[in-house]
Image (cartoon, rainbow, N blue to C red):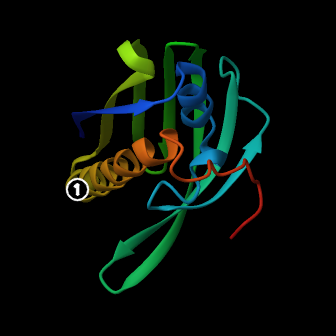
Amino acid sequence: MLRRSSFSYTVQARCSVARAAALLVDPRRQKGLHPLIVRVRRVPPRPGARASYDITDRLAAGPVRLPITYRADVLVDEPDEIVTVARQWPATTVRNHTRLRPEPDGVVRVDVEITLAAPAPLFGYAFRQARAAHLGLAARLAVVLDGAAPQPPPADTPR
């Protein structure tokens, strides 16, 4: 039996919507920002996807860090909206729905909703890991988008 739940967050930064979208649509640019990502490789897109990536995260299991690889597909890549779906065995999916909106004074507002579905025995661990990782990413996004730190270039190579 699958369990499903969502969480959301908002980030505001002084940058253009286009700069924020370029960072958020390409997970290769998020390596170093996303607390779990250790490798991202672009692969041929699945049918219906605008782009696809194999992503390797390093998850904690007690004192051990285990690498897991999953496929992430960009389904919507519009100037004001990005939708990605990541799938990992067994039957775990993470849907990321991001909306970008310009606000006064050169600020962009990024609203993100993450929905995770996983088998009941894995759900608690998977949800806690996803929430911690995405909130960690959110904390770093504003700094990078404000220009206080360089935006990481896309890379397909392991660390």
Camera-nearest residue between 132 and 10: 10
Secondary element at tag 1: helix
- Residue assigned mark 1: 121
Percent position of residue 36, x then y: 46, 61
Camera-nearest residue between 4 and 141: 141
Task: Work out whether residue 8 can be spotted.
Answer: yes
Residue 103 to residue 6: above or below: above
Where, by quadrant of the figure, is residue 27 drawn? top right
Please tell me which residue is depicted at 34% across the width and 76% down the height of the picture. 61
Please tell me which residue is depicted at 41% across the width and 14% down the height of the picture. 101
Percent position of residue 12, x then y: 35, 31
Q: Residue furthest bottom?
A: 63
Q: Residue furthest front?
A: 105
Percent position of residue 71, x then y: 60, 43
| Image quarter (top left, top right, bottom left or bottom right) of the C terminus | bottom right
Q: Is residue 85 left or right of residue 150?
A: left
| Image quarter (top left, top right, bottom left or bottom right) of the N terminus | top left
Q: Amino acid at mark 1?
A: Pro
Q: Is residue 159 left or right of residue 65?
A: right
Percent position of residue 69, x then y: 58, 57
Task: Work out whether residue 91 can be spotted.
Answer: no
Residue 132 to residue 158: above or below: above
Camera-nearest residue between 141 and 148: 148
How many neighbours does mark 1 have within 10 angstroms: few (below 14), some (14-19), or many (20 or more)? Answer: few
Please tell me which residue is depicted at 23% across the width and 56% down the height of the picture. 121
Q: Is residue 9 left or right of residue 134?
A: left
